[in-house]
Amino acid sequence: MHFCSETVLRTALLTSMIATGLGAENSASDTLSVPAPAPRAVSVVRADARTGRLVRRIVVSPKPGDPAVRKLDPAVTAAIEETAKGFDVSPELIHSMIQVESNYDPFAVSPKGAQGLMQLMPATARRFGVTNTFDARQNIEAGVRYLKLLQDTFKDDRLAIAAYNAGEKAVAKYGDVPPYPETVNYVAKVGKKYGQAKRAAEKSKIEAKAMEQPKPVQQPTEDQPRHIQGYLDAEGRLHLATR
């Protein structure tokens, strides 16, 4: 009984202290600060760079409003440019697809098993002779070769992009973008990024060309000052002329 009474007294005292503290805070400010939610821990499957084996790790997601920006590896950019040129595919299209597929994460693995930068399915990787889907250059080359095949097959970038996501048979079956929400969304995302990338590339070309052209020599106008020259003739008369 003595123990219960002591507990009640302690609880009452603690409640009083909390109420007093809150009252002091409210008098200093009308708004109570709400602590930010703790970062969320998620389980992510990634490939080990050395062994190629899949490893599950716990990753803490960034705070809301702090976008995760992946730094683009210059070697990846070089591989995209070289492969695009070799297979006559727009590098802007490849960049756009990689952004949507993996956001340039060479070790990305989707829930369906697609792997690497261009999210190759194991069957597609084998089809194009890939020995390590997490090798950026191999992954890019196989993805671009597959995209080029789809472009040649459907003669339409939009359908080629759809087939890359849903498969060749699905596009052939419907004769258009298959009515799968994932594929429709994928085509829209890639198309939007591709359009932005093409406009940015065209703008850069125009600016570079303008910088290369020599600046024209500016001719004096009537409003600009001219040099005045004077001389005396044999009879002592003054003559003025502008140059």
Image (tube, rainbow, N blue to C red):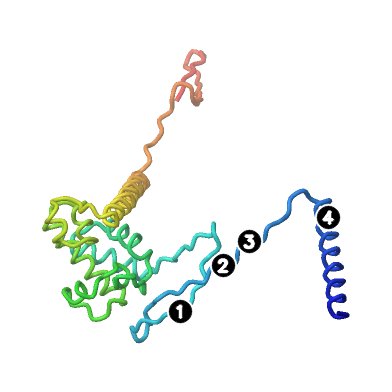
> Is label 2 or label 4 in front?
4
Locate residue 96: give its quadrant: bottom left
Query: Which numbered disc covers residue 23?
Result: 4
Q: Which residue is mark 3?
A: 36
Query: Which amino acid type is marked by label 2?
Result: Pro
Q: Is residue 198 left or right of residue 72?
A: left
Q: Which residue is mark 1?
A: 57
| Label 1, residues with CA under 10 Å away: few <14, some 14-19, many ≥20 | few
Q: Position of residue 25 (x, y in %)?
A: 81, 55
Q: Position of residue 218 (x, y in %)?
A: 41, 33
Q: Is residue 138 left or right of residue 226?
A: left
**Residue nearer the viewer, 190 or 32:** 32
Asked which secondary structure carries label 4, the reply is helix
Query: Which amino acid type is marked by label 4?
Result: Gly
Query: Which numbered disc covers residue 39?
Result: 2
Residue in the picture at 33% in, 83% down: 52
Residue in the picture at 39% in, 69% down: 73
Q: Give the alpha-carbon distance from disc 1 to disc 2, as whole Å.
A: 16 Å
Whether the residues at callouts 2 and 4 have beta carbons within 8 Å, the answer is no
Asked which secondary structure carries label 2, the reply is loop
Asked which secondary structure carries label 3, the reply is loop
> Is label 1 or label 4 in front?
4
Q: Give the alpha-carbon distance from disc 3 to disc 2, as whole Å.
A: 9 Å
Q: Position of residue 46 (x, y in %)?
A: 39, 77
| Label 4, residues with CA under 10 Å away: few <14, some 14-19, many ≥20 | few
- Marked residue nearer the N-terminal end (1 or 3): 3
Query: Which amino acid type is marked by label 1?
Result: Arg
Q: Give the alpha-carbon distance from disc 1 to disc 3, as whole Å.
A: 24 Å
Q: Position of residue 224 (x, y in %)?
A: 49, 25
